[in-house]
Amino acid sequence: MPTLPIDCTVNGAATHLDVAPRTILADALRQDLGLTGTHVGCAHGSCGACTILLDGAAVRSCLMLAVQAAGHAITTIEGLSNPDALTPLQAAFRKHGALQCGFCTPGMIVTAHALLSANPDADADTIRDMLSGNLCRCTGYISIIEAVLDARAAYQEARA
Amino acid sequence: MASQTLTTPAMPAGQVGRSIPRLEAAAKVTGRAEYVHNMSLPGMLHGKIFRSVIPHGKIKHLDLDAARAVEGVFLVAAIDDIRKVIAHPYYGPAFHDQPILADGKVRYAGEPVAVVLADEAHIAEEAAGLISAEYEELPGVYDEVEAHGAQVFVHDELKPAATFPDLAHLLGRRDTNVALDFQLRRGDADAAFAAAEHVFEHHFRTQPTMHTPLEPFVSIADASGGSLTLHTASQNPSFVRIEIARLLGWPENRVRVKVPYLGGGFGGKLYIKLEALVTALSLIARRPVKISLTMQEQFFMVMRHAATIRIKSGVDKSGRITARSCEVWWNGGAYADIGPRVTQKAGFTAAGPYDIDNVELNSYAVYTNRTPAGALRGFGAPQTCWAYETHTDMIAAKLGIDQLAFRRMNLLHDGRPQATGTILRDAAIDKVLDRVAERMNWGTPLERGTGRIRRGRGIAIGFKGITAPTTSVAMINLYADGSCGLYIGTVDMGQGSDTCMAQIAAEVLNLDAESIKVIHPDTDVTPYDMGTLGSRSTFHMGTAVRLAALDANQKIAALAEELGVPPNSNLPFSELLRRKYRMQAGNIIGIGSFIPGYDKPDQETGQSANVTPFWGVGGSGAEVEIDIETGEFKVTKLVNVADVGAAINPKLLAAQLSGAAIMQLGFTTSENMLYRDGQLTNGSFADYKIPCLLDMPAVFINEFVESRQHDGPFGAKGAGESTTIAVSPAIGNAIADAIGVRLMDLPLTAEAIHGAILAAGIGGDDEH
């Protein structure tokens, strides 16, 4: 299978990939780069488990070809994590029990991060709207809203 | 091994009842948790499945050549290839009726017929698309009632598994689609109906739905080294090992089954799913083989039973239900899976949580040409509850008795016999109903809306028995530095069992729950557990863990005595081990095993002195708002209350209760596997809608009542299914309260409501 070369930034690092044209971005991240925190649930853009940031915007990595990432900055859940401590959103998800099986969790946190980065004052309705494209089959969502509301303070502080 | 008479320490250690965050939370929020989804082995091949496009037919010809010719394809296999490594390639928990790949015949559209293996999944997929099959089509049977008496047979003869002695009489039975008929007879229903003041009869239907765990089915087999290791997203590793060993004719110790975290299960990932297939393929290929289903393919694996339910009640002058008869047809699909158990377990509670002297129940597991049906969060209880709680509401309305008062008047209380004759114990049915009524403000009037908008409210309550008899074994390993490992076969698929079990062990051992390491299922390492299913883990494994910890404590005491340490010296066990072995060495190992008592129901009457280890109880209340012009409706308030015994971890429990309720909200209002001529028409997340954040009711309350399971670990019982049971009828009853029209079939959609409104001639049409 012929491959195409692409250059992009992944979690802050300049990255070169040679990918088959048909490779979806989620597979390139997971298989070529070992970034398995991005989970593939439905693989047709409905569940949001594979959400990543493309130039800061939340997008579904199962609906993009890897070659479309050329020249863009990609951030995955690994790029939103640091080895020493949980981030405010991660800590809030842990504290509020906003996860069960954890399969949707990275996508939820990536989407919530995009939302709060743009709008640290988001109210519960806005959060519900923004996260409504991320499906969770386990929790019933109550704790997820609580966690995102709780994490707002850190984003408000960062803005100030 | 600890005896079950041991008591726990008098002073609570404060570990149980504490809402600690789940132990693996940090791994999950950083994307580092281990799933089979993420796993890869050196030399691993990827498999893609070629599936039947017809629901019923004989395979006349299978053309695999084009697929074999694709560059990069390693192997293309059909049933004859499987037979070379597994001579009798049929599996199943209740019946050995399911072939690893279609064997001369296909029985549902979507059934696996052949598999392509390649280094890359894309190549396998492309090649699988080049396979073609010619069929001699046979007439199909799709409806469970129709299939019951049909002359089209899905299977030539019944093949019950030897593991279930109560199915032995079905062996070799021919010319039937009924895999199991369960019956229960209590009192004299005929006489009671004849004497009744009122008799009511209604028919209900529930639709097929699917678990849709976000991590689709995925299994890896590695038979490259003469033994077999399976890495599989399974809810019951012990069963997988036993069944795979049976298929191979190997001793259990040559089959190793490892299970990391699951991305959801909900009853889908039980028994054998992909495991037999990847095992056979790995034996043929002599390389590791992984098969990951897509979300669309999940709909061809297993689903929740659709059901048709006929229910009839006799009521006396005072409003007491004196007789009830139910007939339940379960649409089992093409292979039995655990359907016969659903048929029996949900069968014996099909008359509802009411004190009725004369009960007659018939419950049929019926083969059809659809995706096999199995367990899904409730084991049939939500389907029967839809029927009996709608029926109960309709009777109350007809008699002019308040819905709550009518239920209270007939409710089953502790100390009274359930329909099986088992005396009810530790079932807080009355408390659950009271709490639902309280949270619904049942005594105060409801604002009923004006014009196009109508509002209504409804309540419902249900219960379920628990699979029995089943065994759990737990092992505690105290290491010489003072730390502790807990070895259990319970699968943490999101419910929080790791955390809950660590809390139980910590309570007995007087350790911090957070400091305990829970060793995940690995059949080479962790002892037997029947499975993570049917709300059984907290009660069964929780008890085994408690007993293992008590056993460890006894061994610590014995070691202290051996070393001449005075009792109550409070020397830590690490110090005892140091004194004994003169260095940091050795282990203290505690073992606990638990099987609850059980009395097998009588074949003719279904009567049993002890039919279930405990009762799961759930009640729900709903308020709805309906636009009578369009039928569109919102569940504006949803209250769910469960009897959980005592809570081991209240916060984990809250998420379990709300999650179960939202799942059942989907099964009530939107989810429906739509079949046309035996073909599934909406098997994807784009077309099969599960609840999202915008579907949450504005008021959404989930609670548990204070209660105590006398023989549960620290008073606890299982809770994973309880708030699925009564959601559907609570919403249906609220709709009827709002518009005065009954929907008898699930799901409750705007179209169905609109149709019912038109049929009943209600609404604003004549204003135009």
Image (tube, helix red, strand yellow):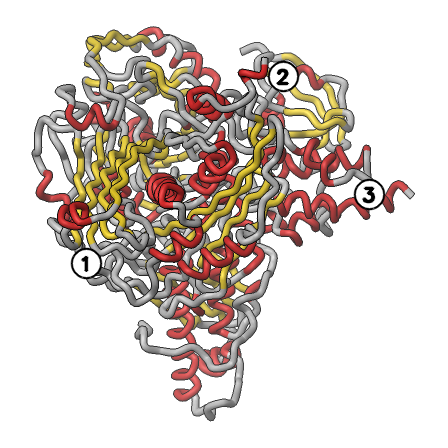
How many discs appear? 3
Give the residue at x 61% y 37%: A37
Residue A119 location (% of width, % of height): 81, 35
Number of other residues with Cα within 10 Å of mark 1, as a class: few under 14, some 14 to 19, many 20 or more: some
- Tag 3: amino acid: Tyr
Mark sitting on residue A155: 3
Q: Is residue A51 left or right of residue B704?
A: right
Task: Give me the C-alpha separation between circle 2 and circle 1.
Answer: 60 Å
Give the residue at x 72% y 40%: A124
Of the pair B466 and A107, the residue shown nearer to us: B466
Do marks 2 and 3 both belong to one polypeptide chain? yes
- Disc 2 to disc 1: CB gap under 8 Å: no
Q: Which residue is mark 1?
A: B608
Residue B357 location (% of width, % of height): 22, 56
Give the residue at x 25% y 49%: B348
Element at badge 3?
helix
Give the residue at x 19% y 23%: B154
In this rendering, is residue B489 above or below B668? below
Q: Which residue is mark 2?
A: A65
Of the pair B577 and B402, the residue shown nearer to us: B402
Element at badge 2?
loop
Do marks 2 and 1 both belong to one polypeptide chain? no
Element at badge 1?
loop
Name the quadrant of the C terminus of chain B.
top right
In this rendering, is residue B452 above or below A3? below
Name the quadrant of the N terminus of chain B.
bottom left
